[in-house]
Amino acid sequence: MSTFMSRFVGLTLILASILGLVVSVGGIVILVQNRQNLETQVVSLIDLMDSSLSITSEGFTVINDALVQTSKSTVLVTEITNDLGNSIGTSSPALESIGDLLGKELVAMIDSAQSSLVSAQSSAKVIDDTLKLVSFFSMSAPKPASGEKPLAESLGEIAKSMENLPKSLLTVQKSIEDTSKNLQSMQTGVYDLATSINQVDETIVNAQHVIGQYNSTVKEIRATTTQIKTNLPRTINLAVIGITLGLVWMAIAQIGLFTQGLELMTRKRFGDAPHPETLPEPEAAPASDDVVKKDE
């Protein structure tokens, strides 16, 4: 290798080692200075997730309360409808009052229950979207069973199943007003109505079961985020120590690279060394007598 190439390669190695050393030392300094900031940002993210989960849990409470009220209403309507069926089957004097009860009061109760379900469905849609966002940030968190319907869809089915109830009640009312001769047929219609209302109550029970699963999932996710937050300082410390050791090892390697480049910069070519024939001859050693004389 020529002297120029040797020095060029040596200079390149020296510059590369200096750059690597600066990067290593700078990385260590930046890592140490920003460790607390990193921990603060991660804690803030975890707190945000926990706050979202808390809001979701409160939303579950609101929806569950709405379902409880709806269930009570459907149970009451079922009992009233069954009682009406029994009354129709045994007597007919109060047909007019029964028609008013079915066409006005019960229709108003069902309309109120439908309004509650529509409001609960809107809240459930927001909660479903919130859970999807939390699951995206928490990859290790548990998820609801894959076979379960979304809560908003379940509430929508409940509301949809109640759409025909007012029409059925009005039909029964019209039958009462039109004739009092078809009591047996009217009784059958009332019992069918009671069966439909009972099916609505069963759907509500299924929706409450879905809410229970969602609530369990939220609790497990919150427990996971709490554990992550508790172990966060130790995890960050271990990560900082590992990265610091890697940067120190990198800096030590740059020192060796710098030494190698310096050696190439200062080393001469073999052809530049002096030829043996051009070296000066060594002086002859003085005779022993001359040495003795000099000593005397």
Image (cartoon, rainbow, N blue to C red):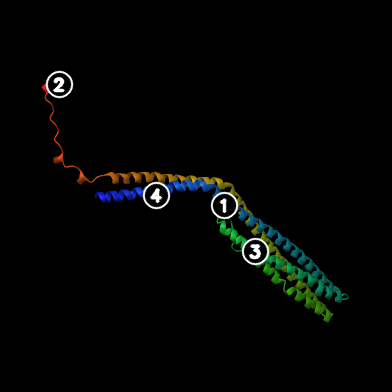
Residue placed at 76% from the left, 71% from the top? 111
Q: Amino acid at mark 3?
A: Val
> Is residue 154 or residue 256 the one in the foreground?
256
Label 3 and label 2: CA atoms lie apart by: 114 Å
Q: Earlier in the sequence, mark 1 or mark 4?
A: 4
Secondary structure category for the residue under label 2: helix
Which residue appears farthest toward the bottom when viewing the image? 178
- Between disc 4 and disc 2, the foreground one is 2
Residue 40 higher or lower than 111, as above or below: above
Tag 3 secondary structure: helix
Q: Residues within 10 Å of mark 2 (few under 14, many from 20)?
A: few
Q: Position of residue 48 (x, y in %)?
A: 61, 55
Q: Is residue 35 visible?
A: yes
Label 3: which residue? Answer: 126
Q: Amino acid at mark 2?
A: Lys
Q: Residues within 10 Å of mark 4 (few under 14, many from 20)?
A: few
Q: Mark 4 against mark 3, which lies toward the viewer?
A: 4
Looking at the image, tell me whether mark 3 or mark 2 is earlier in sequence order: 3
Task: Report if the CB atoms under discs 3 and 1 are less than 8 Å apart.
Answer: no
Q: Which residue is mark 2?
A: 294
